[in-house]
Amino acid sequence: MLEQTIMKSITTIIHRKNLAWINFSLLFLLILSCQKDQTVIQSPVGNTLPAPEQTDDGWNTASPEEVNLNSSYLIDMLEYLDGAADHNVHAILVVKDDRLVFEQYYRGHVFLYSGEDFLGEEIEYNRETLQSLHSVSKSFTSIAIGLAGDLGFLPSINDSLFSFFPEYAHLCTPEKTQITLKHLLTMTSGFEWNEWDVPLSSSQNDVIRLWRVADPLAYVLAKPVVTTPGNSFYYNGGNTHLLGEIIRKISNQNLDWFLRLYLFELLGITDSHWAYFPDGVVDAGGGLSLQPRAMAKIGYLFLNGGIWEGNQLISQEWIAESTTPYIFLPQLGWAEAYAYQWWIKSYRIGPRTIPVYFAGGWGGQNILIIESLNMVVIFTGSNYTAADPSDFLMMHFILPAVDSL
């Protein structure tokens, strides 16, 4: 059965050469997922849930009750999802008070750009499955910029963008000389861009066009500036791709290897995958695939001031700066502000407001960090054309489970 599934995917790739960049990533995920058939089910015993399985991955586990979470709400969430066959959630993890206390996986679809509703092969997700994180990748690129500063590779995020790209000096205009790395981080570069104005299914979307041009960096840098840098927010994955390439220029390491060397290996993250553009540039804005427990490590690292197992991996100063709101976005509704490739929002439960900062990605990929509750929540899924249920699950089940509310 495994061989038949793989051959079917190879045939799909051959017949869709123009989308090979996505399909080869899909094949990588598919092969890995087919080789792992473990499914984690956190089955209730009475009105309580057991601790997730303790493995050698660095996580200490505990039952929800050991950290003052009421299992009955989490059991209600499991029952709700069992009754919603089309929820498209792949994984939910909860970290509370330094321990992994909830972990649940579901059957779901891998991402396939050419598939109906962007859905590919259906597989059993589990803790070993690599998940396409889409724009959660942007937050990892922001982390890389912070690490580059901590390690002495990058003097300042106030440096001019074009100082890193002398080979593209012919594309620089007087307005573009004002653009800094901070403007790239905060999506306020002022470049003309249409990522949110044109459907991702359209070849006219600037993000999709990045995969079809000979030089993605030149494509971004050639865009005209239409607003004063630093003044206006517009979501622009091209900004993030420039940041990823700046990492390569200042460290002589591609973004994926830089993060592997200076972060992932130190966290015990041994399995990850980044997609590359056809010209060899890392897809810094959406190309990372990671396991949910690894996602939770990143959330916990930020929650814990950059410390993992007693080692300071990221400076507390960068964590604070990069997650502080830079520009407020009341017009969005689903988020309140943007920081350095991190979103800011809050949940209102009864009279209480609970602030959250998070990495968010298309389809329902989320790393939610809730400092006031000493808590991290992870969601993954494939809701590419349907509503992401993460906020509903947070407000009706996960946050009410916190006894301190």
Image: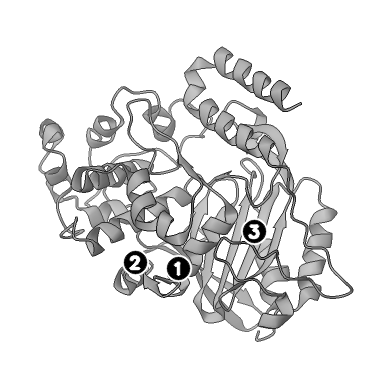
Q: Is residue 305 left or right of residue 78?
A: left
Mark 2, other Cα within 10 Å: few <14 / some 14–19 / many ≥20 = many
Task: Report the residue marked by disc 2.
Answer: 314
Q: Quadrant of the C terminus?
A: bottom right
| Amino acid type for the residue under numbered disc 3 | Ser
Residue sticking out furthest to the top: 15
Upstream in the sequence, badge 1 or badge 3?
1
Name the quadrant containing residue 48. bottom right
| Callout 1 amino acid | Leu
Residue depicted at x 71% and y 76%: 64
**Residue 38: image location, x then y, percent:** 73, 48
Residue 390 is marked as 3
N-term mark: 2 or 1: 1
| Quadrant in which the N terminus is drawn | top right
Within-10-Å neighbours for mark 3: few <14, some 14–19, many 20+? some
Residue in front for this viewpoint, 214 or 327: 214
How many C-alpha atoms fall within 10 Å of the one at disc 1: few (<14), some, or many (≥20)?
Answer: many
